[in-house]
Amino acid sequence: MASESTHAVLQPNVGTAEHGHHPAQMPTGIMRWVLTTNHKEIGSLYLLFSLLMLFVGGSMALVIRAELFQPGLQYVQPEFFNQMTTMHGLIMVFGAIMPAFVGLANWMIPMQIGAPDMALPRLNNFSFWLLPVAFGILLSTLLMEGGGPNFGWTFYAPLSTTYAPPSTSFFIMSIHLAGISSILGAINIIATILNLRTPGMRLMDMSLFVWTWLITAFLLIAVMPVLAGVVTMMLLDINFGTSFFDAAGGGDPVLFQHLFWFFGHPEVYIMILPAFGIVSLIVPTFARKRLFGYASMVYATASIALLSFVVWAHHMFTVGLPLTAELFFMYSTMLIAVPTGVKVFNWIATLFRGSISFEVPMLFALGFIVMFTIGGLSGVMLAIVPADFQYHDTYFVVAHFHYVLVPGALFAILAGAYYWMPKWTGHYADETLGRWHFWLSVIGVNLTFFPMHFSGLAGMPRRIPDYALQFADFNMISSIGGFLFGFSQLIFVWVLVKAIRGGEKAPAKAWEGAEGLEWTVPCPAPIHTFETPPKFVPEVDSPSRH
Amino acid sequence: MSSQYYVPPTSKWPIIAVAVLGLTAVGAGSLMSYGSGLPFLLAGVVGIALVMYGWFRDVVNESMGGLYDAQMDRSFRQGMGWFIFSEVMFFAAFFGALFYIRVFALPWLDGQGAKGITALLWPDFTASWPLMNTPDPSIGGPNAVINPWTLPLINTLLLVSSSVTLTIAHHALKEDNRPKLTRWLIVTLVLGFVFLVIQGIEYVEAWTQLGLTLQAGIYGSTFFLLTGFHGVHVTIGAIVLLVMLLRVRRGHFSANQHFAFEAGAWYWHFVDVVWIGLFLFVYVF
Ligand SMILES: [Cu+2]
């Protein structure tokens, strides 16, 4: 039987011919990866792709930090600097963070709900392979006449329409492809969660990672089409003479910002809700306690998602909104701090009087809680309209969203990777290297982004290759931190390669305090798990049991 | 456990679909950005059509082979339902843009309301809807707009009745009354086809006689954006229903198992509802 196999999915060279379940259907070599419909293999592809994009986008960040190491122009021209800030943002958001979470969803959701695979496996393959094409097109614009996108990752009109480089139509096409990939991936995830749970598992018995992904998938299906709509309007303005974002014809450039941020704000929750889910699994495991307030975590996640539809204009306080709008969006934004606070409270309450141990996944999860909260608090500062007038488009904003995305989303992804690496590869991640990775990352990330709060408050504008002399010290610290953080991530590659090739073998339940169906199957997980629905008894197995 | 999950085998269609979609994107991108790439675009579009044919044919064959269980059926249903929701949001963005322009942007440009200071840009501009005179006269608005009570009203009646006839066809399928099913499905398709023809006539008239073009300021922009994407969706829906007709003639579907037909019907009703919104907010009000 296939489930007896101890075949590791990350090792494509291990033969699969002995599988009785799908005889003669498994292609070999590269075609196996091209045609795969297996959720674990597609999960691995997503994760490896996002790791690659992390380094591509990271290299661009280092170009930016090298240029900003000192005032004046040293290495790049302002035109290229603009392309770097734009591409860095686009690649990190759409190419690194989002696909990494989709990869984790692919790997873990079927295993956590006792499903054999994703609900629509071929669609899953389609969703993944669209991404390399989309990002191939996006990256190729850097080599085109007039250069790549240079209008910032938020691509505000008219910078992205009237004054855009000719390659912008390629940029729009790549956004469309990535958007199709996201929507179809999200549909697949929802159908999997709602339809493929093992008998007996109710919604309130699901792990929080599954819950947060269910809500994230809903957000994706709701807002990715709006992004598709807004880039389509851009395309028409550029190529067909329409006036959507041109006031001369009766349109409005501010309309672009409304549509973009109607997508963009939920988008930031798309990048953080699954992170909440991962941390909500890891903290109980290493505190050896059940999660405090399971139900309130679910409700808080849902509230954050619903609120995310009515806060978008907090990105536009200085653009010239009516006073009523400024007040409404200020209050609604501050309201989000309440469910977010519930979550942080619950994590801390879970830690309270737990028997805590500090393995690498736990270190990253704790780092997440502390530093994500820093980013959350600066977010509340930015929500205050009069204060935002001062902070807007300064490095304070850059500091804020990098705190929620780097030691926030990225740390949670890394925490999840260390947590589930035994399940993926059969071996524990190297503990010593993992600790080096964590501590160098913590130091690097804070050196990079904490000084940005100060340079921003002092008035340093973002997206400018040069700056006034008084910002020199802070920028030098940020650049040193940036290079430290960037090169520290190579340790993770080393850890991953080591774990794939060998290391300390992990039992099915790799962590003493871990709960959930994924820990009932062997490490590494055989290529096919749960071909028949596993037994699930809510009174025993549910994270919400009392 | 007695119940085994069904996991479909691998297929070459997804990766081919990625290839032709990528080809289309590259073709369209280079055509618009640098003026060349039409062959890629055409090859991509033809490729998409072939892939849809091949992929759906395989799925239909698997379905006819009885390979899909009730769980797979639910997955398809949920997938289609959420796909339609994503389409709703796509149109919601366009309707949102229309309302924003009409309720906020134009009055402000005219000097009214909270941001009336915008009127400093073009002091002579007067807002109206439909917007016949653009703020900057060099862009120029349309000379006239489509009268809602002529062709658009006929189109509304056509599309609403097509939803009714499709429902009759669906009931006929549930009663296993094949001749009735075929008849009403054909009526639905004819109604959809006539709708598209009338839409075409309207476009030609707008473009050549009324000066209502994509370049005719924000009215022309929103008009063609909303009606154009709706027309594309009617076309897709009609192709789906045509495929359903061909499958019905081949004896596919049973009285209680015909999800593909239902999915096509859902899509058609969705397109119909969008049209009602269009008729009201693009043509009438
Ligand atoms: Cu926001």
Image (tube, coloured by chain):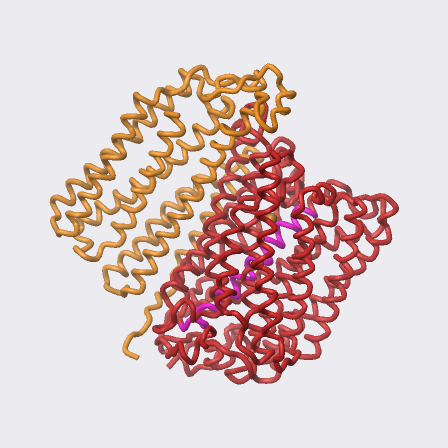
Chain colours: A red, B orange
The image position of residue A488, as x and y in percent, is 73, 67
Please give the name of the residue rendered at 31% of the width and 38% of the height, measured from the top-left corner: B272
Residue A545 can be seen, yes or no:
yes
Q: Is residue A448 left or right of residue B16?
A: right
Main SS class of the magenta portion in the image = helix
Q: Quadrant of residue B49?
A: top left
Seen from the viewer's position, the closer of residues A18 and A179 is: A179
Please give the name of the residue rendered at 54% of the width and 44% of the height, measured from the top-left corner: A262
Start and end of the magenta stretch? Answer: A85-114
Q: Is residue A21 left or right of residue A135?
A: left
Please give the name of the residue rendered at 22% of the width and 49% of the height, measured from the top-left corner: B247
> Is residue B55 within the magenta segment?
no
Tell me if residue A162 comes above or below residue A507 in the rendering.
above
Please state, as top left, top right, bottom left or bottom right, where the N terminus of chain A lies in the image.
bottom left
Seen from the viewer's position, the closer of residues A327 and A147 is: A327
Please give the name of the residue rendered at 29% of the width and 50% of the height, measured from the top-left corner: B263
The image position of residue A349, as x and y in percent, is 60, 72
**Total labels drawn:** 0
The image position of residue A493, as x and y in percent, is 65, 69
Q: Quadrant of residue A201?
A: bottom left
Tell me if residue B133 comes above or below residue A161 in the rendering.
above
> Is residue A104 within the magenta segment?
yes
Q: Is residue A430 left or right of residue A111?
A: right
Q: Is residue A99 left or right of residue A88?
A: left
Seen from the viewer's position, the closer of residues A375 and B233 is: A375
The image position of residue B10, as x and y in percent, is 39, 64
Seen from the viewer's position, the closer of residues A112 and A130 is: A112
Residue A81 can be seen, yes or no:
no
